[in-house]
Amino acid sequence: MILVWMISILLIGGVACWLVAQRDPLACKWTALVAVVAAFLLPVVWYLRHTPVVDGNAWLIDYQVNWIPAFGIGFHLAMDGLSFVMILLTGLLGILAVLCSWREIREKTGFYFFNLLWTLAGIGGVFVAMDLFLFYFFWEVMLVPMYFLIAIWGDFNRRNAAYKFFIFTQTGGLLMLLSILALYFIHGQQNNGNYTFDYFALLNTTLGNNATARWIMLGFLIAFVIKLPMVPLHSWLPDAHSEAPTAGSLILAGLLLKTGAYGIIRFVLPLFPDASAGIAGWAMLLGVVGIIYGALLAYAQTDLKRLVAYTSVSHMGFVLLGVFSFNQMALQGVVMQLLTHGVSTGALFALAGMLKERLHTRDINQMGGLWTAMPHMGALAMVFVMASLGLPMLGNFIAEFLILLGAFEVNPVLSVIASLGLVLSALYSLRIMQKVFFGQIQTITDPPADVSAREWIIMASLTIAIVFLGLFPQPVFNLVSGVVEQVVRL
């Protein structure tokens, strides 16, 4: 019931925000903050109280009741080590997204926090749904409110960005729905008419590596790599990131992209092991293309948020490279990459929002010399720029090092080319610091204020997280080792 309460608190909290805002906008903000904190404290407190032993076959929580039994649909939520670490990331970034919105959102506050909390509920549901019909339901739940967050509270070109985001992700979602239905009918025919959407039952479906299996697998995979995103299906991402409000960019980069990677690890590889192995070489190649392409385009940007958005394309290329290496070390690195990218890129988007609030521009050519006026923000930016380029002692280094080391055993050539992405990441990362905080001082009438107390809470939380993941990654490895071993054995 813990997982049910987690999702329910977010859904009810979103509705409460909408109702309370009509009388008191400040109470609406506190309602949102309390709801998010309460929702994500539940699984954490449960874990600390029970301290379960995580192994290859252990699910920490497994809750199932009949929902629509006539069609084999159950309300099945379960959490293992992988789900738990993704829930932790969702909780951290969800709380910080509410704090990022505290001063930025001044109109339609209730509807804004309604959409924000429902997006978080959808993301949380995606990470724990073990019925494919329920998984698709949550997949769509997180899509619609995110569309509204971009379309209503975004910047000047928000409508086009929201339309592109919706069209791309909805197209992928519909392809996944067709694949879910195909798998549902094939499993039913193989089991004497016992039709079900249950994940554990569908794992026993016999498919092999025939054309049917490949087409069904591609339906899932395309939906997930659009969300990841993979080149050339990435063009919605820079527009959505650059136009979304700060919290929207934080959720997009930190969480929505991770649902794509989670879907590949949880569904594509276990359900279609042979078909996945058949396309592994092409998937790794596209991952390497994304690493280099995203880094080059990031270096060419002058819009700060767009620059950070293209770094996400590059970093997510490492995820694709690692997942399809079918190597335990690389997969451990992939899980670390999901966490560390969510923290470091989320922090860069939060910093971009703070700068936009003060300078009313995202053009890095109109910035410069800001370290003098904002030394604390400059120091925080330095930490996360160093994290983004993979400096040791910060989490991203562990993730990318393990991915490259694991992938090298499978395909040395692609791994060597991918390592060039680390060199390019140093170029665009240092360009951010040079253009924004160093260089020639731009004419500023009033020096901008440095980091406020609320912003200190946001950035300190992310700094602690990225340093902890860089120095003590073993707890994460312990949590996901069983999941990784199962995937590698397939």
Image (cartoon, rainbow, N blue to C red):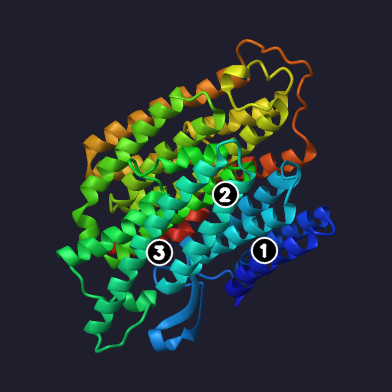
Calculate the distance from the C-alpha at mark 3 to the C-alpha at mark 1. 24 Å
Nearest to the observer: residue 43 or residue 393: 43
User: How far across and how far down the image is residue 76, in percent?
Assistant: 48, 77
The answer to whether the residues at label 2 and label 1 have Cβ atoms under 8 Å apart is no
Residue 385, picture quadrant: top right
Quadrant where the C terminus is found in the figure: bottom left
Calculate the distance from the C-alpha at mark 2 to the C-alpha at mark 1. 19 Å
Q: How many marks?
A: 3
Nearest to the observer: residue 486 or residue 103: 103
Disc 2 designates what residue?
Answer: 251
Residue 485 visible to an observer of this rendering: no
First along the sequence among labels 3 and 1: 1
User: How far across and how far down the image is residue 214, in percent?
Assistant: 21, 61
Q: What residue type is labelled 1?
A: Leu
Is 455 positioned to the left or the right of 209 in the image? Answer: right
First along the sequence among labels 2 and 1: 1
Q: How crowded is mark 1: few (under 14 residues within 10 Å), some or many (20 or more)?
A: some
Residue at image point 64% right, 26% down:
361
Q: Which mark is residue 41?
A: 1
Q: Which amino acid does label 2 sit on?
A: Ile
Is 379 positioned to the left or the right of 225 in the image? Answer: right
Nearest to the observer: residue 149 or residue 138: 149
Disc 3 designates what residue?
Answer: 482
User: How far across and how far down the image is residue 198, in percent?
Assistant: 39, 78
User: How far across and how far down the image is residue 440, in percent?
Assistant: 62, 10
